[in-house]
Amino acid sequence: MSENQYKAVILDLDGVITQTARLHAKAWKQMFDDYLHQRSQRQGDDYTPFDIDADYHEYVDGKPRYDGVKSFLASCGIELPQGNPDDSTDQETICGLGNRKNQLFLDVMEQEGVETYSDTVEQIHHWRKQGVKTAVVSSSRNCAAILDKAGLMDLFDTKVDGVDSAQLNLNGKPAPDIFLQAARELSVEPENAIAVEDAISGVKAGKAGQFGLVVGVVRDGGGDALRHHGADVVVRDLRDISVTPEKTTQSLPSALEQISTIETRLRDRQLALFTDYDGTLTPIVQRPEAAILSQEMRSLLLQLSDQVIVAVISGRDLADVQNMVGIDKLYYAGSHGFDVAGGGIQMQQQQAQASLPELDEAEHQLREQLKPIAGAKVERKRFAIALHYREVAESDVERIQAIVDQVVQNHPQLRQSRGKKIFELQPDVAWDKGRAICWLLDKLDINTPDVLPMYLGDDTTDEDAFQALRDRGIGIRVGMPDEPTQANYYLQNPDEVKQFFQALLKTLDERN
């Protein structure tokens, strides 16, 4: 996802930046269960314990502490006097119980420490390098203490938390007040800022504040509830959000014309070359099995692999792309990076393996439902199902899309993507070509400043790789569609890729 008009990102704390949501939930449960148990003993009633999975998100998550107490007790049919913020922790008031919860939270935090989400911290560093302003918001009065304990205080231009809300008389979520206050302190209009939240009350607040983009974060499970309540998009990994200016392929410079610039970047650095197969090393053809690698292109890859690391990252099955290329010394990643091999390395993405039964069921349903449609071809791969419709009548494409949509809806562990005349179903886990490249860089111990990674690809499925290398490498989009891209350069077709490889080889030969 790439959005170019945003000048600031305002992030919730618990569940987005830090993993303190778990600590909060633990403290809430202990406080409510203790109170309900004592109350039931006095009155002789049964009680239902606080349910972390259901009650936490429904009644307390993202809300100011006292509002959370009142909200959950109301669901139990219990009414208590409000009391005062300085009530002791043993007073039977809304404030007293809220203060008891706060003390329990501080105790748990001191014992267990504060864990952060590495994807969020990495992305915040990236945004700040781009000049994007960042702010943290929280209903918690402990926000500063949490940030300090996690060592994150310097990552934000401003913060608005529970202490600030009390001083400024701001309404709690789902009112948008704390997000709007953060935008004011950043001197940014809400429509030019992104609001990032993991709680229903938070996405409601972002929507009510009319922020330019409301991002829901779901670390596990589905994101339907966040979408329903106002999230424009839902992600599992904050690195999927980019505020870099969008470019189109047609606005890019030619990699052939800029070869001297690329050579300059390669000076005193080792090249790590990653490339797609179909549409990049070979032209796009009607049937996948007809995409034969030319002997000249194979020879170039072989010569390049004598001097640098070369890896082919393909949507094809691993065994298929290995067979099509036919060079043992290369590294390969099949199924868009879910299946990696080469140089003694073998890796199948662990989370994706749990989705194999879902893929089996979805494959069966697609084959049955698409039988009547002439030209539709279902191709099963280890970690994906590709539905090719290049030979399908144009009038049947919408029908195919509807069938695919329904199958995906029936299998929540899967996600859908589109390529050139293809629908593809993959495990819905945080993995793609970009992450596979980063994994290989780490595994081969070449994720270092003296290595320049380069990726060539021709399709929207290659944008994850371009994005992964945007700050540390070179992305080259093959083909000239007028669509957004995170690549740095373009090449018109596989013939130009061949010319580019020849120029690279010449540069490497001269250097050596």
Image (cartoon, rainbow, N blue to C red):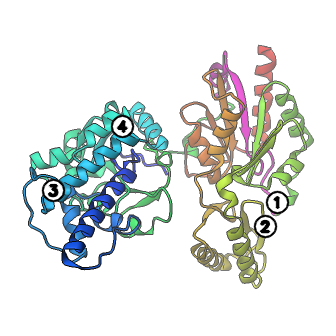
Badge 1 or badge 3: first in the primary sequence: 3
Circles 4 and 2: CB distance less than 8 Å?
no
Q: CA distance from mark 1 to mark 2?
A: 10 Å
Q: Does residue 117 sit above or below 373 in this rendering?
A: above
Residue hosting label 4: 132
Badge 1 or badge 2: first in the primary sequence: 1
Quadrant hosting residue 204: bottom left
Circles 1 and 2: CB distance less than 8 Å?
yes
Q: Give the label, 2 or 3, closer to the camera.
A: 3
Under tag 4, what secondary structure? loop
Q: Over which residues does the magenta segment extend?
A: 258-286
Q: Outermost residue, bottom direction?
A: 372
Q: Does residue 240 sit above or below 274 in this rendering?
A: below
Query: Of the residues shown, which amino acid type is indicated by label 3?
Result: Asp
Q: Give the label, 1 or 2, closer to the camera.
A: 2
Q: Give the label, 4 or 3, closer to the camera.
A: 3
- Residue 69 % position (x, y): 21, 63
Crowd rating for badge 3 (residues with CA inside 10 Å; few <14, some 14–19, many 20+): few
Query: Of the residues shown, which amino acid type is indicated by label 4?
Result: Val
Badge 1 or badge 4: first in the primary sequence: 4
Crowd rating for badge 1 (residues with CA inside 10 Å; few <14, some 14–19, many 20+): few
Q: CA distance from mark 1 to mark 3?
A: 71 Å
Circles 1 and 3: CB distance less than 8 Å?
no
Q: Is 267 part of what is drawn in magenta?
A: yes
Q: Is 495 part of what is drawn in magenta?
A: no
Q: Residue at x 83, y 63 (%)?
A: 287
- Residue 37 % position (x, y): 27, 69
Which residue is at the front of the view, 261 or 237? 237
